[in-house]
Image: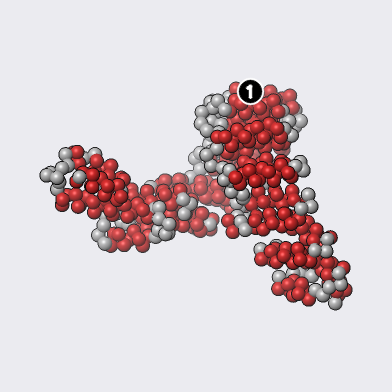
Amino acid sequence: MVTRSILSIFKRVNPIALNRLENTRSWRVLSSRSFDSSSFNETLAYAKEENRILKLGFSRRSPTSSMLQNLVDEGHKVKFCEVRGIFKQLIKGRRYKNALEIWTWMEAQRKFRMSAADHAVKMQLVIRVHGLAAAQEYFTNIPNTSSQKAAYLPLLRSYVKERAIEKAECFMLKLNGLGLIVSPHPFNEIMKLYMAMSQYEKVTLSIIQMKRSKIPLNVLSYNLWMSSCGEVYGIESAEKVYKEMLIDKNVEVGWSTLATLANVNIKSGLIQNANFALREAEKKLSNSNHLGYFFLITLYTSLKDKKGVLRLWEASKIVKGRITCVNYMCILSSLVKLGDLLEAERVFMEWESKCFNYDIRVSNVLLGAYVRNGLMNKAESLHTHTLERGGCPNYKTWEILVEGYIDNQSMDKAVDAMKKGLTMLKSCDWRPSHGIVMAIAEYFEKHGDFKGMNRYLKLIRQLDLASLPVYKSVLRMHLCAQRPALSIIKMMEADEIAMDDDASLLIQKIR
């Protein structure tokens, strides 16, 4: 009885502490005679406090450094390993602000010493919570070179992600001045930025700088260089880079390099060469990673080679590991682009039979295909089906349906779908296109539907989507029906809509 009751107590308190106690000899011989109440109470008290600390990371209430400090002030021992556990859970839950606060509290403790890797982690948090300016300041204040070396890459990657080319270049100069660039990784990041900004010549300049500084090129360096040469100088220049890579003993040509070469050939219109490179790339694919398979699938799609797409798709199923939702989105998009909706439907059904969580992004690919092909009945049936399966529509779902309903002149359904899409604006940056907004307004204008237009105008005004063209559509309705538009003019003034000559003329005619 005693053993059972103590087990139940520890299960409620903390499974970690329970496991620790189960592994001790005293637990195995515990009985009503041998039970040491003082020792047990001490262990139980520790377990409760440990549980209290660990629960901070899972609590719905935002954990703060003050909670941890209160535990310390009350005389409890707080282990840094436990706090790191809380920290990791916060990161996993995307509660970056709380995680940064916990980290800052740890830094303030005298016994805590930050490693170089710790600085890299904190840099990522500062970027997410406070932005690039604060991250740059944090980098400047990092006390030693080894920590700066660990922390600079997240900052550089953020500049690349934001396409802040001048800041990225200045930062590279600073890193070079500090002697921190000793690997190809920072050069690869800035070359990715140059490729994204179509500044291909600067990629070659970066390669020249790497060679001068005796920094070895890796596979990504060669791939970026090859791509940029293809864009600027053509296939011959790209092939020279490829040949140079073949004699570089420090790198191994894999599927990614051959795929890059194939892509350059595709852009040059050399389809036979591209196919040869892709076939060679297939021989280099891993049997433990799906990435290469789906990269090649996209290239075969661009060649309109359905056999190649299906061959790689079937081959990918043999690879170790689960085929992800993103992988299914890739193959579905390829089949849709190739015009094979029947095969796309078959693959979709296969995904549905295996999925654990219904990812609406997968069904959106097929939904969009139906809408673009004018199959609105199928689109609506699929939408109903996804809801029945537990799918949660996102803004893209509603955007696809809105476009379909507009093309089908089902404006009531379009407005309803837009309302549902607009309710998601708080959680994303999506905005319906100007074309969608105007298509609905023009429909109401064409049919003289004042009731529908008024409801619609109220909706888009709430979301700051009312524009001069929308108001001009409303004004034309009032002019055609010879209705007063004083309320509309007041709305325009409240929304600070800048008038043009056409709007001023409409108002003058109405008055």
Q: Quadrant of the C terminus?
A: bottom right
The quarter of the displayed image where residue 237 is located? top right
Percent of width and height locating residue 505: 86, 71
Q: Residues within 10 Å of mark 1 (few under 14, many from 20)?
A: some
250 vs 281, left or right, is left
- Amino acid type at image mark 1: Glu
- The residue where tag 1 is placed is 280
Percent of width and height locating residue 96: 47, 54
Please report the residue visible at 51 percent of the width from the left and 54 percent of the height from the top. 128
Please report the residue visible at 64 percent of the width from the left and 25 percent of the height from the top. 311
Q: Quadrant of the N terminus?
A: top left
Kindly state the secondary structure of the residue where label 1 is placed: helix
> Is residue 472 at all visible to an observer of this figure?
no
Residue at the far left in the pictured view: 33
Percent of width and height locating residue 57: 39, 53
| Residue 53 vs residue 5, the one in the foreground | 5
- Note whether 355 is above or below 63 in the view shown: above
Percent of width and height locating residue 452: 75, 63
